[in-house]
């Protein structure tokens, strides 16, 4: 249950805006941020402190891709893409006081900006200074619908590396003491260059751990 000091006020649902707290102090909209801090501080000091903390601590959740294997990626004649992609990630909460409820984790895989699969992961709570591992398995067939799609999926990879992006659509709530924020909806994008693996799922070069970005 999210806690708000003005449950009857319709505005309380709108605070905080994830686009704002993820945009950090380096953004070119300082006056808007200031306005938001001020209005948030009016809504509730606890929440205001939390937002303040968030704005001045960008990249507070670290997301890394620690391992990838792509054992199948074939576009067959029938407008059908066969794929078998495993992506291992870690999500790290570096803070010593704030816990995170991951209420929804939708992970989508894209090739050449074209989505071919999406998975919903099990919700969980992440405590202080904790690291969670996510194991994403995208396996199956994608049947193309649009006219443009087939040519995109058919595109040969450059240097044998497939440009695959994995995006996470999150719904999270933060917990500080007994206070919980309302739902935030950050997005995370991991841009990967993935070679097709041999049958056993390994490939010649070691995979370089890749840091993911916040999408604003
Ligand atoms: C991904 O994680 C699973 C489970 O921890 C492990 O069995 C698998 O080998 C990992 N795959 C890669 C490519 O890192
Ligand atoms: C091609 O697609 C059609 C309809 O989607 C399906 O009935 C047929 O079995 C498919 N053929 C092959 C070779 O996959
Ligand atoms: C998450 O994915 C499920 C299907 O896996 C979909 O029904 C749902 O609308 C998605 N939610 C969001 C917020 O993208
Ligand atoms: C992370 O959370 C799990 C489950 O709540 C717990 O068992 C583990 O000890 C925690 N790890 C750290 C480093 O706090």
Image (cartoon, rainbow, N blue to C red):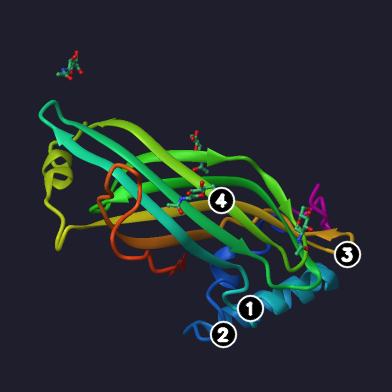
Q: Nearer the viewer, mark 2 or mark 3?
A: 3
Circle 4 SS class: strand
Mark 1 packing: few (<14 Cα in 10 Å), some, or many (20+)? Answer: some
Marks 1 & 3, CB-CB < 8 Å contact: no
Q: Nearer the viewer, mark 1 or mark 3?
A: 3
Q: Nearer the viewer, mark 2 or mark 4?
A: 4
The answer to whether one can see residue 216 in this image is no
Report which residue position mark 3 lands on.
Answer: 177
**Which badge, 3 or 4, comes first in the chain's sequence?**
4
Residue interval drawn in magenta: 1-10
Q: Quadrant of residue 45?
A: bottom right
Q: Quadrant of residue 100?
A: bottom right
**Which badge, 2 or 3, comes first in the chain's sequence?**
2
Distance CA(mark 1)–CA(mark 3): 19 Å
Name the residue at 75% across, 72% down.
50
Report which residue position mark 1 lands on.
Answer: 55
Distance CA(mark 2)–CA(mark 3): 25 Å
**Which badge, 2 or 4, comes first in the chain's sequence?**
2
Distance CA(mark 3)–CA(mark 4): 26 Å
Marks 4 & 1, CB-CB < 8 Å contact: no
Majority secondary structure of magenta residues: loop
Asked if 20 appears above or below 160 in the picture, the reply is: below
Distance CA(mark 2)–CA(mark 4): 30 Å
Report which residue position mark 4 lands on.
Answer: 134
Residue 12 x %, y %: 73, 58
Marks 2 & 1, CB-CB < 8 Å contact: yes
Name the residue at 44% across, 57% down.
67
190 inside magenta stretch: no
Report which residue position mark 2 lands on.
Answer: 25
**Which badge, 1 or 3, comes first in the chain's sequence?**
1
Name the residue at 83% across, 55% down.
3
């Amino acid at each position: 249950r999210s806690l708000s000091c003005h449950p009857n006020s319709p505005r309380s649902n709108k605070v905080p805006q994830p686009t704002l707290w993820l945009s950090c102090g380096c953004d070119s909209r300082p006056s808007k941020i200031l306005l938001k801090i001020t209005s948030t501080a009016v809504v509730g000091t606890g929440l205001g402190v939390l937002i303040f903390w968030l704005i001045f601590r960008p990249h507070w959740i670290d997301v890394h891709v620690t391992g990838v294997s792509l054992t199948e990626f074939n576009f067959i004649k029938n407008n059908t893409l066969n794929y078998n992609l495993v992506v291992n990630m870690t999500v790290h909460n570096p803070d010593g006081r704030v816990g995170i409820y991951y209420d929804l984790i939708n992970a989508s895989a894209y090739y050449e900006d074209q989505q071919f699969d999406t998975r919903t992961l099990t919700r969980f709570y992440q405590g202080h200074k904790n690291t969670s591992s996510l194991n994403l398995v995208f396996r199956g067939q994608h049947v193309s619908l649009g006219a443009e799609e087939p040519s995109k999926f058919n595109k040969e990879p450059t240097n044998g590396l497939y440009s695959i992006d994995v995006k996470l659509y999150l719904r999270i709530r933060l917990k500080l003491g007994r206070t919980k924020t309302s739902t935030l909806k950050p997005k995370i994008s991991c841009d990967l260059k993935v070679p097709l693996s041999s049958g056993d799922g390994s490939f010649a070069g070691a995979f370089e751990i890749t840091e993911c970005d916040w999408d604003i």
